[in-house]
Image (cartoon, grey):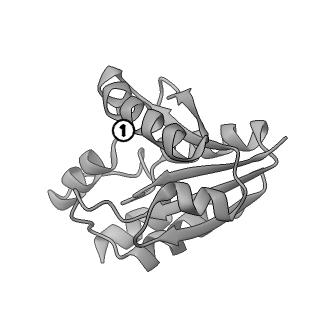
Amino acid sequence: MAIAVYPGSFDPITFGHIDIATRAAKLFETVHVLVVHNPGKNPKLSLDKRVELVKAVLANKPGNFVVSSLASGLLVDYCKEVKAEALVKGIRTNVDIDYELPMAQVNRDLSGIETVFLPADPAHGFISSSLVKQVASLGGDISKYVPAEVVEALKN
């Protein structure tokens, strides 16, 4: 078994993200859940708050998780630093494949790291952080999509 990195903005972390992380933990000895800054997105939660929430929700899940953040720089450099052999990406639809595949190819070209795509569990396949934030901002109940810690954080 090897080390994998599961990167994401996790703004906020959803049950879909948690499912991918715990399934990846069955495949890899250690999974680094890496909270990254995405310059194409305007985060609702600070980087530190997102790291705190990821740590809280994974604390009681089976698997060897390391939770950290990357505020700038290349993902592949982080992977080299922690000696990761794979990146883990969750795939919900063909839109995700169209977005993720070119990045996987560039990451492999830059560093040789392989990307492992895990299909979303159908129970979570429609959940996105953007949708959760939108429902929360309009006063909707998001408790079916995110852990209680996240519900509370988005209320504040």
Location of residue 131 in the rendering, given as x and y in whole percent from the top left corner: 25, 45
Residue denoted by label 1: 127
Which SS class for mark 1? loop
Location of residue 79 in the rendering, given as x and y in whole percent from the top left corner: 61, 56
Up the image or down, 82 lies above or below 140; here it is below
Location of residue 150 in the rendering, given as x and y in whole percent from the top left corner: 43, 64
Q: Is residue 6 left or right of residue 11?
A: right
Q: Quadrant of the C terminus?
A: bottom left
Q: Is residue 124 left or right of residue 28?
A: left
Residue drawn at (62%, 66%) of the image: 67
Q: Is residue 128 left or right of residue 28?
A: left
Q: Amino acid at mark 1?
A: Ile
Most distant residue in the left direction: 138
Count of labels in the image:
1
Q: Is residue 94 left or right of residue 133?
A: right
Up the image or down, 32 lies above or below 4; here it is below
Q: Nearer the viewer, residue 67 or 111?
A: 111
Q: Nearer the viewer, residue 129 or 115?
A: 115
Q: Nearer the viewer, residue 103 or 66?
A: 103
Q: Quadrant of the N terminus?
A: top right
Q: Nearer the viewer, residue 125 or 147?
A: 125
Up the image or down, 7 lies above or below 87; here it is below
Residue drawn at (42%, 57%) of the image: 10
Location of residue 9 in the rendering, given as x and y in whole percent from the top left corner: 39, 58
